[in-house]
């Protein structure tokens, strides 16, 4: 069952087209990843689902109803925005009390609920701290706490890990996993870093310039991305270049192009390959077998933008 | 049953929104600055002119309350609170935490408006009470006059808060335009007084006061009821337009 549906949705901000005839479905009970470079339309999509933004065209549904008019469904949703949207004058516990009562005005055991949430997001020690005195990571934890405070069925998380240190990221990822596993909470989580979500999500949607360019299981997306030609540069002494390259080009389909240039006393070899892991293995093997030293090895990281353009041009759009 | 439960929940949520607005006023530096600054004229005005009789004390209290407070300071307080209540929260993204909860956009505007009214009225009551206390030391002023001033302050707060919330939605730089509107209203009220004074909101508020006490000047040819209807129309129309504009606005 689809918990949120966007059908032919377009959204424009002045001259900028944020989304163009965009379709997306969020599956119930799953952790759905939503990945794209900055400006791809991720946040716009999440705002449309939460009813913060109105579509120019198309249909947006949350639990089968309009997120703008059917406000009761918002009790079932928790949202973490990318912005610093906490009242800076409030204390952590005070803010949680207000927001909990705004969502469920007559809910009993609010204090127990808040205490449990504070423990879950690792903010129990800071319950009486003023929001204005919290670090960015702590604020992020409070925002996540506010989103899960009322036991929502559906969590919408816009870059929820930004500002968190590695331990904090791990802890929050574990929390999301736990909520999904134990309570069946559906999650839609956005990021511009695919690796960040790979381990947690069961399904990924890649978005670029307001359009879905690929969607599926993380393994499928990983395959697509690894089919992207990587540029690897290594340096060796001039005498060894020939022996290394003659071996490498014999491996079927490993190398797409080679460029050689001189740099100081070394030869710099730039290789384009669609299979970087095999290339590394083979390069090491050949270097050992031929006693050809490698003095420098570097993978040239392309921008996410270029990767997404490659996926579109290569006809990987699904 | 469901409608009743929903209505009860909506009202409870509204009360929490009002509570947030009031706590925000007290806890924020901006709120404290508004309260303290608005008290300054109440302290300074009686020092400038010391009344020698009860009648003069009453006249000075009414003049200071109407010209200074109802004419300028209360509208400025409404401007500071009204122009920053919803729109500034949209600009600073703080409204997001409220908007993702089960509250209608119309309810947010309405309850924030109620919050502004209560906050501004509380400040107005404190200010005029301080002013009353300062003048009454120099002559006995009827307590009824203080109640009249509170009544007119209430009307002033209701009308101006609505106008300034609307302005914050309708135009950029609402604070600047708000000051211009207050000044224009005062100048219009002064210049056009001889032409019945109907151009000024302030004049209409004071016209309602003329029904309470003869110390408040009456507008020629305009009844208290006409002024009340006009102010009610301005208030309701600006509030409705604010709600409509917020309904079709992207929050982020």
Image: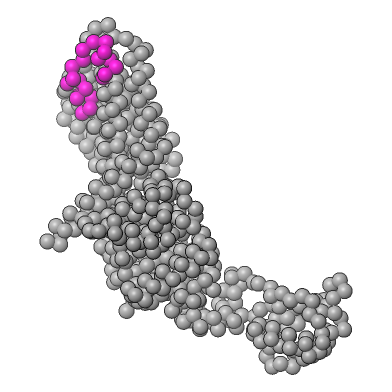
Residue at the extreme top: B52
Instruction: Tell me how many marks there are.
Output: 0
Where is residue B55 shown, x and y percent of the image? 22, 10
Horizontal side, residue A212 vs residue B231: left or right? right
Where is residue B206 shown, x and y percent of the image? 24, 24
Q: Residue at x 53, y 73 (%)?
A: A194
Q: Find the magenta span and give its range.
A: B132-151
Horizontal side, residue A52 vs residue A279: left or right? left
Q: Quadrant of the N terminus of chain B?
A: bottom left
Colour theme: one colour
State the image quarter where residue A101 is shown: bottom left
Question: Which secondary structure is most common in the magenta stretch?
Answer: helix
Q: Residue at x 22, y 51 (%)?
A: B12
State the image quarter where residue A188 is shown: bottom left
Where is residue B100 shown, x and y percent of the image? 34, 59
Where is residue B108 shown, x and y percent of the image? 29, 50
Q: Is residue A79 above or below residue A251?
A: above
Q: Residue at x 44, y 71 (%)?
A: A174
Residue in the foreground of this view, choosing between A19 and A31:
A31
Residue in the foreground of this view, choosing between B49 and A181:
A181
Residue at the extreme left: B1
Q: Is residue B199 visible?
A: no
**Is B139 included in the stretch rendered in magenta?**
yes
Q: Residue at x 45, y 70 (%)?
A: A173
Q: Is residue A209 above or below residue B155?
A: below
Q: Is residue B139 visible?
A: yes
**Is B62 included in the stretch rendered in magenta?**
no
Q: Is residue A251 above or below residue B18?
A: below
Q: Quadrant of the C terminus of chain B?
A: bottom left
């Amino acid at each position: 069952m689809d918990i949120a549906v966007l059908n032919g949705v377009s959204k424009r901000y002045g001259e900028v087209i944020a989304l163009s005839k965009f379709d997306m479905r969020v599956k119930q009970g799953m952790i759905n990843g939503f990945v794209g470079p900055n400006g791809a339309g991720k946040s716009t999509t999440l705002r449309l689902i939460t009813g913060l933004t109105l579509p120019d065209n198309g249909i947006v549904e949350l639990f089968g109803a309009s997120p703008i008019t059917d406000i009761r469904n918002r009790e079932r949703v928790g949202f973490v925005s990318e912005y610093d949207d906490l009242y800076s004058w409030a204390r952590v516990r005070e803010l949680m009390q207000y927001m909990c009562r705004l969502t469920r005005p007559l809910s009993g055991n609010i204090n127990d609920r808040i205490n449990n949430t504070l423990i879950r997001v690792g903010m129990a020690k800071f319950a009486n701290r003023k929001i204005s005195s919290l670090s960015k990571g702590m604020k992020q934890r409070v925002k996540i706490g506010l989103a899960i405070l009322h036991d929502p069925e559906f969590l919408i998380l816009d870059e929820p890990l930004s500002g968190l240190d590695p331990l904090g990221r791990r802890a929050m990822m574990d929390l999301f996993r736990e909520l999904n596993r134990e309570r069946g909470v559906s999650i839609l989580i956005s990021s511009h870093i695919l690796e960040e979500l790979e381990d947690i999500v069961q399904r990924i949607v890649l978005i670029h310039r307001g359009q879905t360019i690929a969607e599926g299981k993380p393994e499928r997306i990983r395959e697509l991305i690894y089919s992207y030609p990587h540029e690897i540069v290594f340096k060796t002494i001039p005498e060894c270049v020939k022996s290394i390259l003659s071996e490498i080009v014999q491996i079927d389909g490993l190398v797409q192009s080679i460029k050689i240039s001189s740099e100081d006393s070394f030869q710099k070899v730039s290789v384009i390959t669609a299979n970087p892991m095999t290339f590394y293995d083979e390069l090491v093997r050949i270097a050992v077998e031929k006693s050809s030293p490698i003095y420098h090895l570097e993978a040239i990281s392309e921008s996410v933008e270029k990767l997404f353009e490659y996926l579109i041009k290569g006809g990987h759009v699904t | 049953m469901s409608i009743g439960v929903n209505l009860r929940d909506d009202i409870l949520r509204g009360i929490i929104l009002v509570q947030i607005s009031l706590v925000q006023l007290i806890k924020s530096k901006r709120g404290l600055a508004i309260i303290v600054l608005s008290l300054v004229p109440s302290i300074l005005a009686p020092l400038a002119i010391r009344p020698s009789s009860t009648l003069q004390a009453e006249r000075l209290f009414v003049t200071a309350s109407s010209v200074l407070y109802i004419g300028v300071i209360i509208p400025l307080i409404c401007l500071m609170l009204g122009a920053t209540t919803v729109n500034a929260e949209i600009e600073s993204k703080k409204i997001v935490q409220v908007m993702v909860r089960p509250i209608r956009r119309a309810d947010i505007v309405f309850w924030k408006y109620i919050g502004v009214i209560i906050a501004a009225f509380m400040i107005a009551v404190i200010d005029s009470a301080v002013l009353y206390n300062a003048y009454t030391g120099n002559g006995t002023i009827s307590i009824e006059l203080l109640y009249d001033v509170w009544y007119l302050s209430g009307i002033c707060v209701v009308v101006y808060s609505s106008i300034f919330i609307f302005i914050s939605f309708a135009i950029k730089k609402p604070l600047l335009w708000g000051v211009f509107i207050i000044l224009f209203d005062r100048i219009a009220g002064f210049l056009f007084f001889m032409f019945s004074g109907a151009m000024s909101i302030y004049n209409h508020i004071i016209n309602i006061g003329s029904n309470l006490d003869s110390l408040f000047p009456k507008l020629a040819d305009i009844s208290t009821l006409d002024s009340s209807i006009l102010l009610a129309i301005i208030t309701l129309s600006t509030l409705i337009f604010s709600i409509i504009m917020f309904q079709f606005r992207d929050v982020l």
